[in-house]
Image (tube, rainbow, N blue to C red):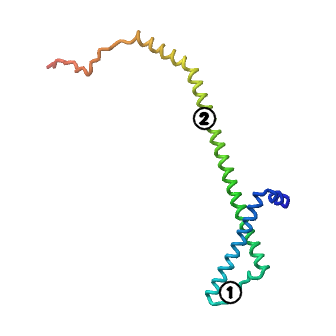
């Protein structure tokens, strides 16, 4: 962990980010102390806060800086997880597209291979039906034959 932090600080950009976070923590603590003093003065109490002591102030800055670093680390991990999830989703889409293209090529290949068989089958059907087919004289409903009534 120490080696990683040392290498991180050797990079000028990373060092600048770390110093910016430390500065932001210090400014936040100074702002909260100022607000506390303003509130105490408004309430009519003496404007002395525990952060006036340099050790307490230093400790408050340390805590705030650690909070900021932790928040940045959490955001970084969330961002990396999101990016990883996105890459995984894209890879799955690519694989699905490849499989779909493969299925389409396979279907086209099978379709072309079976084409001759289908054409021959159709030609045979056409040849057989031309000679055999006769038109029937269709009459719709024939009335029943009339039978003469017989009396006894």
Secondary element at tag 1: loop
Q: Residue at x 66, y 50 (%)?
A: 85
Q: Mark 2 to mark 1: distance in Å?
A: 73 Å
Q: Position of residue 132 (x, y in %)?
A: 40, 11
Judged from this view, the residue extending furthest toward the left is: 151
Give the left or right position of residue 90, taking residue 130 as reference. right
Q: Position of residue 138 (x, y in %)?
A: 29, 17
Reply above or below: 14 against 148: below
- Determine which of the numbered discs, if any, sits on residue 100 in the image: 2
Q: Residue at x 77, y 76 (%)?
A: 59
* Circle 2/circle 1 CB separation < 8 Å: no
Q: Residue at x 80, y 58 (%)?
A: 8
Reply above or below: 39 against 146: below
- Mark 2 residue crowding within 10 angstroms, few (<14) / some (14–19) / many (20+): few
Reply above or below: 43 against 78: below
Q: In which quadrant of the rendered view does residue 113 lie? A: top right
Q: Position of residue 99 (x, y in %)?
A: 63, 35
Judged from this view, the residue extending furthest toward the top is: 131
Q: In which quadrant of the rendered view does residue 75 lie? A: bottom right
Q: Residue at x 77, y 79 (%)?
A: 56
Q: Position of residue 116 (x, y in %)?
A: 54, 17
Front residue of 87/9: it is 9
Please identify the quadrant where the N terminus is shown.
bottom right
Q: In which quadrant of the rendered view does residue 38 lie? A: bottom right
Which residue bears the numbered disc 1? 47
Please identify the quadrant where the C terminus is shown.
top left
Numbered disc in front, either 2 or 1: 1
């Amino acid at each position: 962990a120490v080696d990683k932090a040392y290498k991180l600080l050797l990079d000028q950009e990373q060092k600048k980010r770390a110093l910016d976070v430390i500065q932001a923590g210090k400014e936040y603590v100074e702002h909260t102390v100022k607000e506390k003093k303003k509130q105490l003065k408004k309430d009519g109490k003496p404007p002395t806060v525990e952060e006036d002591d340099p050790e307490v102030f230093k400790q408050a800055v340390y805590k705030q800086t650690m909070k900021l670093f932790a928040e940045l680390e959490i955001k970084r991990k969330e961002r990396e997880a999101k990016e990883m999830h996105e890459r995984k989703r894209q890879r799955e889409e690519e694989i699905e597209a490849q499989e779909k293209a493969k299925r389409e090529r396979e279907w086209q290949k099978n379709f072309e291979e079976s084409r001759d068989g289908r054409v021959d089958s159709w030609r045979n059907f056409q040849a057989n039906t031309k000679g055999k087919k006769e038109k029937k004289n269709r009459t719709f409903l024939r009335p029943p034959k009339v039978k003469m009534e017989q009396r006894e």
